[in-house]
Image: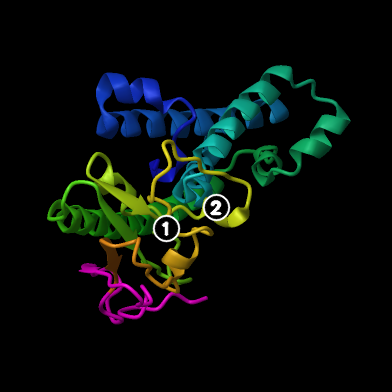
Amino acid sequence: MDQYHRRFDADGARRHFGFSAAEKIVVCFCVLCFFWGAFAFIAASTRRAPWMLSPAIAMITYGFTFYAGFMNFYLSLGFGFFAAALSWRGTRRDWILASVLGLCVLSVVRPRRWIFAGLTILAAVFFAFEYSDTGILVGMERQVEMLVAALPYGARVSYTIDFGNVTRINSRHLVDRACIGRCFTYSNYEPGTGQFRLRILPQGSRVVSQSGLALEHGTYIVRAEDVPLWEIYQPDEDDLTKLAIRSLTVGEKNGRLGHQHPL
């Protein structure tokens, strides 16, 4: 399983630097590509370096797409912005296309100090909340590492971690990194789209759920061939950042304890 879908060309970095360092290198590259690609595109469309808009570009760079982990899409946007900037001709048709991006429109406004000051304040507030959210995520990942460290090698791990709509923290892949080289985590939501297929050679019993959604939603009934199977869940409804782990038994519904996933 690959954390946050960062697979576009991360294997080479992983082989040379290891999983932890490769992840940081790849993510930094994606962030820089997106930021400077957007910067170049706005500069080409307005013929003015958009330094005034750099706080807004930074907020978009660390927006939902970044935290959702759609790195292939994220990186392709960065490359697309660079390509559009290089091929920009400044025609009226191009301007209509550029108007889709609100920052391009804002960039044609005569630079004012109060605009930059306002965007800087917004960026400061945005990244303050970002820092808080990231701190919560890091703390939960540390809990997961402690929980799976006690499991036997090759253990099967599922989880029913969900924050609902109270936060934009992506909790779908919290367990994946901790399980690298240690355990198997059943958490991928992509099979639910019907657009992906997983083949196992030689044939084995590692497949638990055909949809990939029942385990995450806590509606999966454990079968005899699934055990031993472990579940990481949120035991405290008043503090959803607390995590616990338990062994599932045959015939039980995996989400019967702790916080319930809002279907």
Q: Residue 77, percent across and down?
A: 60, 34
> Which residue is the extreme one toward the right?
92
Q: Find the distance from the CA under tag 1 to the CA under tag 2.
A: 12 Å
Q: Is residue 139 left or right of residue 26?
A: left
Residue 100 sits in quarter: top right
Dot label at residue 132:
none
Asked if residue 214 is positioned above or below residue 186 in the image, the reply reads below
| Magenta span contains residue 250 | yes
Q: Tell me if 245 is positioned left or right of 123 in this view.
A: left
Q: Which residue sits at x=31%, y=53%? A: 175
Give the residue number, with chain letter if any, for mark 2. 191
- Could you say where residue 119 lies in the image, as x and y percent from the top left? 50, 49
Tell me the crowding category of disc 2: few under 14, some 14 to 19, or many 20 or more residues within 10 angstroms, Cα based: some
Nearest the viewer among 263 and 230 is 230
Rendered image quadrant of residue 31:
top left
Q: Which amino acid, mark 1?
A: Val
Quadrant where the image shows the N terminus: top left
- Could you tell whether 139 is left or right of 251 in the image? left
Q: Is residue 166 visible?
A: yes
Which secondary structure dominates the residues rendered in magenta? loop
Q: Which residues are magenta?
A: 235-263
Specify the amino acid type for callout 2.
Pro
